[in-house]
């Protein structure tokens, strides 16, 4: 995928290198957390989701994650391959868990 950073530089990123994407509070910006770097881009989470449907899973109002990097899901948290824990709201927990278990079954 190709994204434009906040400093207007253009970056090509392999989707499998992305761990998760989070919103930057009170700004139309996203922070993309990758296995080896972090990049801030001018984009909204809904806009990013529409550009790349099916690649990421919305687990929270402020987070998209790459299901390939999920190592553990437990009540109201998801742990990623780098040890990062992302919150999963109680109302979304059952749905997120079901989707992640389907991802594992399909591999």
Image: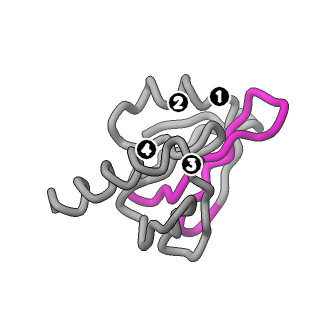
Q: Position of residue 99 (x, y in %)?
A: 31, 49
Is there a contact, CB below 8 Å, between mark 1 and mark 2?
yes
Q: Which mark is residue 10?
A: none
Is 104 placed left or right of 48 in the picture? left
Secondary element under disc 3, as helix, strand or loop, is helix
Upstream in the sequence, badge 1 or badge 4? Answer: 1
Upstream in the sequence, badge 3 or badge 4? Answer: 4
Indicate which label's residue lies in the foreground, 1 or 4: 4
Q: Distance from label 2 to label 4 (Cα)?
A: 12 Å
Q: Position of residue 32 (x, y in %)?
A: 61, 49
Q: Residues within 10 Å of mark 3 (few under 14, many from 20)?
A: few
Q: Which residue is mark 3?
A: 90
Query: Camera-side residue: 69 or 29?
Result: 69
Q: Which residue is mark 2?
A: 48
Q: Distance from label 1 to label 4 (Cα)?
A: 17 Å
Q: Which residue is mark 1?
A: 43
Q: Distance from label 3 to label 2 (Cα)?
A: 24 Å
Is 96 placed left or right of 27 in the picture? left
Upstream in the sequence, badge 1 or badge 2? Answer: 1
Residues drawn in magenta: 16-37
Give the residue drawn at x 36%, y 42%.
55
């Amino acid at each position: 995928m190709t994204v434009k950073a906040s400093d207007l530089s253009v970056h090509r990123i392999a989707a499998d290198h992305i761990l998760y994407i989070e919103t930057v509070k009170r700004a139309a910006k996203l922070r993309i957390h990758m296995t080896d770097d972090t990049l801030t881009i001018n984009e909204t989470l809904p806009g990013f989701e529409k550009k790349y449907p099916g690649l990421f899973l919305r687990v929270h109002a402020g987070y998209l994650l790459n299901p390939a990097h999920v190592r553990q899901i437990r009540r109201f948290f998801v742990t990623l391959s780098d040890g990062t824990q992302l919150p999963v709201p109680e109302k979304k927990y059952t749905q997120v868990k079901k989707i992640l278990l389907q991802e594992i079954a399909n591999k």
